[in-house]
Image (cartoon, rainbow, N blue to C red):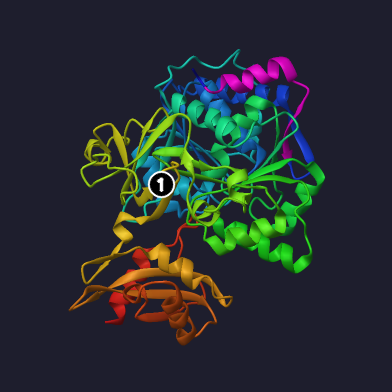
């Protein structure tokens, strides 16, 4: 099934309901949203776009993002979302690899891409050429597609090399959306989806269940993440659900505590995309209340591996609530999750190993990359590259990426465990722990710290909480940690800095 039918059906029965907003201003109701998407589809088909063709979206957050996305699906094509924060050359690689012949873009992004990619037609959504699309007769209904047809070609963040295109099918998007309804919360017509993180990534991929339910879709006027703007829009609309990276949650909490904001109108904040440290989520729940839920997923299984529901995040009565809060939750309804060895063989409960997942939300493979697919899908299981363990109740605790684990003197050190301890210090804002080559021990633990805590205090904190061999042997203070455009810390860059110091 073409997932675009969800918009078509909503427009048929509730066309007058408000759909798209820019700030507080209504841009389109569901009938208008549907019509504009159908006109984009008609235009694409007039340009020769066929079912299965790729059409790119290199845009900042705005209501037209969703119009274009559904227009692509209505035409039977596949959307290729590109983070607007990427360098034009990075975007050019994705356009070339995907074979996208048309790219919808935003001001400031269109010109560099047009120069670098003469084989793709760039359509700036603020120009008359784009607005003329809406004088065309609309397509009658979405083009039928099979469940396993390509819907969304998502490129990984590429922290260790060129990004790979993840084949995301209509079935995967339906599975992910229905799991959200089952494992996180039931979206209803009076809810509001607020897009304060890039719509090319986790924030945008959560639009489908809100379209199906007929909820409101709000893009901040700033086009991005601004704490004061988020709090204002939440008060205005109410019942706001938003996706936020852990660093965004921490910033929202700090601003709210400093300014007296209560978070009125925020219904659910889904956090994902990086490690949420225990101290940060405890402080966030203490201030905002039980509005947080966690999703663990990857591009290869979008937002669809495990979920830690609001009740679990807010619970302080269970005897093991801290351990559960450190976890990423339990397997979502449409997948199986296991802990496996390096060959992809599932291991007994309690065993430390690699997190494996299989089910309807898992990708069939990478775009034009059978070698990478064969290394990642093993015996039917997606090898996530994330290390962790599962307890008797099915809660999965993620420790680190397999490549980030430090082996010192034959003992495994999981950086996240050390980072959790260091973040207990009130003068540590951010921290990243990596391994440094050592002639005797193989590797030794070092920490990069954003904050004003001195090394003696941090040493004492570690000595009081973890084994001595896990304690960092050096601390380096930075004004901030290097991150990619999705907010993930670039440990490869930190390791390079260590190499440059020798």
Residue plotted at (60% across, 21% down)? 6
Residue plotted at (54% across, 61% down)? 278
Viewer-proximal residue, 184 or 218? 184
Instruction: Classify mark 1: residues with Cα within 10 Å, few (<14), some (14-19) or many (20+).
Output: some
Residue 68 visible in rendering: no
Q: How many marks?
A: 1
Viewer-proximal residue, 465 or 87? 465
Residue plotted at (51% across, 72% down)? 480
Q: Position of residue 237 (x, y in %)?
A: 79, 42
Residue plotted at (49% across, 84% down)? 457
Q: Is residue 51 magenta?
A: no
> Which residue is identified by label 1?
391
Q: Is residue 12 magenta?
A: yes
Q: Position of residue 127 (x, y in %)?
A: 64, 39
Give the left or right position of residue 332, taking residue 446 as reference. Answer: right
Viewer-proximal residue, 331 or 36? 331
Give the left or right position of residue 490, taking residue 253 as reference. Answer: left
- Badge 1 element: loop
Of all residues, the one furthest to the front in this rendering is 319
Q: Quadrant of the C terminus?
A: bottom left
Residue 333 visible in rendering: yes
What are the residue bounds of the magenta stretch?
3-21
């Amino acid at each position: 099934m073409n997932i675009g039918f969800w918009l078509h059906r909503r427009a048929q029965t509730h066309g007058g309901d408000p759909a798209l907003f820019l700030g507080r201003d209504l841009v389109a109701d569901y009938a208008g949203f549907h019509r504009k998407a159908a006109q984009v589809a008609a235009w694409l088909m007039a340009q020769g776009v066929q079912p299965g063709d790729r059409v790119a979206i290199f845009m900042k957050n705005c209501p037209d993002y969703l119009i274009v996305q559904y227009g692509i699906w209505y035409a039977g094509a596949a959307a290729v979302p590109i983070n607007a924060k990427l360098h034009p050359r990075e975007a050019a690689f994705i356009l070339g690899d995907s074979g996208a012949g048309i790219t919808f873009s935003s001001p400031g992004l269109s010109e560099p891409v047009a120069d670098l990619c003469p084989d793709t037609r760039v359509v700036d959504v603020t120009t008359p050429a784009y607005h003329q699309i809406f004088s065309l007769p609309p397509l009658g209904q979405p083009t039928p597609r099979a469940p396993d047809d390509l819907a969304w070609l998502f490129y990984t963040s590429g922290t260790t090399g060129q990004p790979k295109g993840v084949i995301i099918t209509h079935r995967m998007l339906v599975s992910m959306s229905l799991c959200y309804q089952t494992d996180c919360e039931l979206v209803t017509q009076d809810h509001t989806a607020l897009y304060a993180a890039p719509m090319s990534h986790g924030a945008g991929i959560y639009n489908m269940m809100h379209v199906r339910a007929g909820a409101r879709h709000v893009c901040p006027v700033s086009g991005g993440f601004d704490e004061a703007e988020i709090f204002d829009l939440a008060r205005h609309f109410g019942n706001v659900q938003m996706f936020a990276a852990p660093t965004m949650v921490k910033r929202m909490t700090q601003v709210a505590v400093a300014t007296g904001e209560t978070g009125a109108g925020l219904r659910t904040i889904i956090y994902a995309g990086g490690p949420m440290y225990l101290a940060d989520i405890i402080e966030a729940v203490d201030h905002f209340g039980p509005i947080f839920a966690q999703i663990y997923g990857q591009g290869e299984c979008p937002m669809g591996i495990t979920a830690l529901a609001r009740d679990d995040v807010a619970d302080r009565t269970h005897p093991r609530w801290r351990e559960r809060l450190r976890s990423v939750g339990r397997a979502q309804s449409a997948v199986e999750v296991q802990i496996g060895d390096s060959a992809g063989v599932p291991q007994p409960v309690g065993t430390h190993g690699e997190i494996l997942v299989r089910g309807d939300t898992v990708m069939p493979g990478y775009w034009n990359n059978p070698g990478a697919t064969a290394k990642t899908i093993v015996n039917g299981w997606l090898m996530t590259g994330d290390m962790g363990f599962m307890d008797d109740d099915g809660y999965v605790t993620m420790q680190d990426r397999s490549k980030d684990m430090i082996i010192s003197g034959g003992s495994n050190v999981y950086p996240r465990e050390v980072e959790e301890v260091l973040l207990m210090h009130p003068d540590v804002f951010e921290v990243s722990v990596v391994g440094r080559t050592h002639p005797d021990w193989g590797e030794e633990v070092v920490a990069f710290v954003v904050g004003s805590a001195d090394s003696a205090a941090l040493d004492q904190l570690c000595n009081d909480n973890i084994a001595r061999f896990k304690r960092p042997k050096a601390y380096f203070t930075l004004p901030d940690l290097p991150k990619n455009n999705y907010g993930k810390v670039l440990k490869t860059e930190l390791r390079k800095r260590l190499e440059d110091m020798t």
